[in-house]
Amino acid sequence: MPIEINGFSPRRTQTSSDRRVRSLKGDGGSRTAGGGGAAGAGDQVTLTGTAARLRAIEQQLARVPVVDLERVQSMQDAIKSGEYRVDPQRVADKMIELEAALDGV
């Protein structure tokens, strides 16, 4: 079933007269009207000491494995041998800590 759309021509293309853009001269070079200027030749980015430390920490974390396989194996062994004990007070404390942390978010 064909659909007819009035006023639409597939051959019509947008020309420079359809949109009006003007250049503005500013201190940092040229930019287009409507905000968001182009980067000027004198622009530079400086990282703070905190940003540099965060980047170093991020690189260190990227090298750490997601799962501690030794700990997983020791937990599996403790469960299999019946040595693993659950401390209900510790579980409750951790649940309370998590709940408090989520409230602060």
Image (cartoon, rainbow, N blue to C red):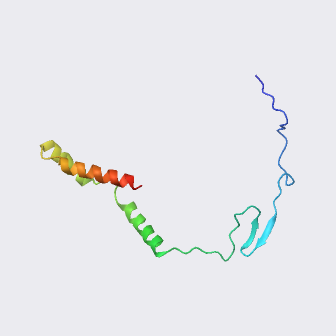
Horizontal side of 55 relative to 35 (left or right) equals left
Image coordinates for residue 91, horizontal then vertical, percent? 23, 49
Q: Residue, x 28% and y 54% (percent of image)? A: 68
Q: Going by the picture, which residue comes out furthest to the top?
A: 1
Q: Residue, x 17% and y 44% (percent of image)? A: 79
Q: Residue, x 19% and y 47% (percent of image)? A: 88
Work out whether 102 lies above or below 33.
above
Image coordinates for residue 32, horizontal then vertical, percent? 76, 64
Residue 24, by quadrant, is: bottom right
Instruction: Give 97 or 71, whichever is nearer the viewer.
Output: 97
Residue 62, by quadrant, is: bottom left
Q: Residue, x 46% and y 75% (percent of image)? A: 49
Image coordinates for residue 101, horizontal then vertical, percent? 35, 55
Q: Going by the picture, which residue comes out furthest to the right?
A: 17
Quadrant of image for the C terminus: bottom left
Quadrant of image for the N terminus: top right
Horizontal side of 57 relative to 91 (left or right) equals right
Horizontal side of 52 relative to 16 (left or right) equals left
| Count of labels in the image | 0
